[in-house]
Image: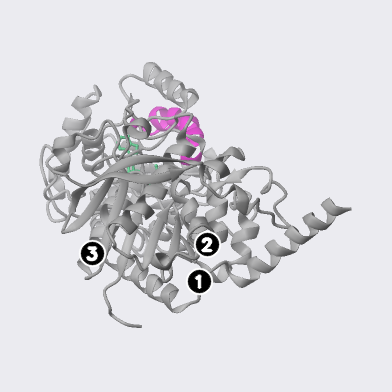
Amino acid sequence: MTNTPLKILYLSVEVVPFAKTGGLADVAGALPKAIGALGHDIRVVMPLYGFIHREQLHGKRILKNLAVPIGKEQDKCDILEGHLGDGVPIYFVDNPRLFDRDGIYMYPDDAERFIYYARAALEMAKALRWQPDIVHCNDWHTGMVPNWLQTIYRDDPFFANTRTLFTIHNLAYQGIFGHRVLEIAGVAHHGFLAHPDLYDLNNVVDLMGRALIFADAVNTVSPRYAQEIMTPERGEGLDPILRDRAETVFGILNGIDQALWNPASDRYLSVTYDGEHLEQRQTNKQALQALSGLPSAPNAPLLAMIARLVEQKGADLLAQIAEWAVRYLDAQLIILGTGEEYYQNLFLDLAKRFPKQIAVNITFNEALAHRIYGGSDIFLMPSHFEPCGLGQMIAMRYGAVPVAHETGGLADTVHNFNPATGAGNGFTFHDYTPEAFYTAVVRAVETYRQPKQWRTLQATSMKADFSWRKSAQQYIALYQKMLEQPKGIPYQLQERMQLVQQLANSTEST
Ligand code: ADP
């Protein structure tokens, strides 16, 4: 393994502090800085959305009228260069037709928007003559890149030594579209894909599925989730591909930006504090109760959840136990999230029924999130499945003790507290049932009522190192390993895909 600095083009459609709906943005805003700090030349590319304040960028327009192929046409964009921080450049793809919108997702032309963005990133690298060793792609929006590098750019000397890493942040969101998307992506003549165990693959265009086939390596954001996605239960229909290429599928745990998430310097908190001054949290708790319209109750266990309100996050389990927690445990509960209307209404209804104990904020609010991490006692993560989860790590850093379902990254980061030995940093439950979740909450509340034990638990969780440094080192080791391996579809997968193609052809000819 050499220590030569690598050139990494890092693609993500959300990046803190410019655009965020969830953990992907946190990762994309922090990991590149940690990789840059280890001496590598990493550059981030994202779309220039309409809602991004242009003054915030201090951006230089470094490319004008860059021609980017889309379908049979070309559409032009400008590239602005700004700074992510710590010397890491970030490039913004400026195409008002596609990106001058109020939000990030959920537009009817999303496939075209993100395919265009990903293609623009590659064309930008060429125009800048900046030849990446690695193109690090994140989630389905970037899924065409590994496919392109093995089709339309296969003979392009510029990318001759470039490898692609595809990171799965959530396998449940695959970017599934109709066949016209292949024309938009310019690969219609390369045909459809088929796999013996995936009967649907040639009926749709699954952008994530394509990336999983063509990427030189694949990883996901925790070791446990990397194992889980190989199974039919958690593979979201793509597990046969992942099993075929199991030797090139890795799990690297996410970290958190410990400068951004730091209770000792957090400007949103009423009072900053560290592990030695946990009593200060009480002031934040009071402020949070007041802000949420809840009565000041210094000794009531204050439970909280910050999440997208969808089934994946365990919204249904929370809805089922919320009433028990406030009725039988004298707890208070604060929820911050947006998501499916069904859950939003369910929680709003609960808040109406228990106005003195339950506060619900259906909004995306960064400041309030910080105040909740810094003022709540118990942080709930009952996710049905969880690729990594950042909330539990942020909560621990702030001394809010997590209650988490034993799945994916939650299982890798939250370890059940054992009152006899003092080991553990939170409370976990195994069966995905309201009863099991509630039992874990009861254990948390009982421990909360033992102040000495609770302090120890808080102090343990605050000491954990969730910095990006270790993960950044693992990514670099993976990049280096990829560069030592030949490019292309993993051999075993290639064999299986070809087999079906032949069968399909022979069926057609009969
Ligand atoms: P996911 O990426 O699946 O949504 P993660 O736990 O990985 O879940 O990351 C969620 C991130 O988004 C955390 O930083 C969390 O604090 C933040 N977040 C989620 N919902 C909200 C909200 N409504 N307001 C502010 N921050 C939120």
Residue drawn at x 55%, y 45% as measured from the top left: 432
Which of the pair 157/99 is nearer the observer? 157
Q: Which of the pair 200/351 is nearer the observer?
A: 200
What x and y, as percent, mark residue 219?
A: 46, 62
The numbered disc on residue 150 is 2
Sequence-wise, which precedes: disc 3 or disc 2? Answer: 3
Image disc number at residue 487: 1
Dots 1 and 2: beta carbons under 8 Å? yes
Q: Residue furthest right?
A: 510
Which stretch appears magenta? 312-337
Kind of residue at badge 2 = Gln
The answer to whether 114 is drawn above or below residue 352 in the figure is: below
Name the amino acid type tagged 3. Gly
Q: Quadrant of ligand 1?
A: top left
- Whether residue 185 sits left or right of residue 131 in the image: it is right
In the rendered image, is residue 203 in sight?
yes
**Residue at left offset 24%, top offset 21%:** 293
Whether the magenta-drawn stretch holds residue 317 is answered as yes
* SS for dot 3: helix
Query: Which residue position is annotated with label 3?
Result: 36
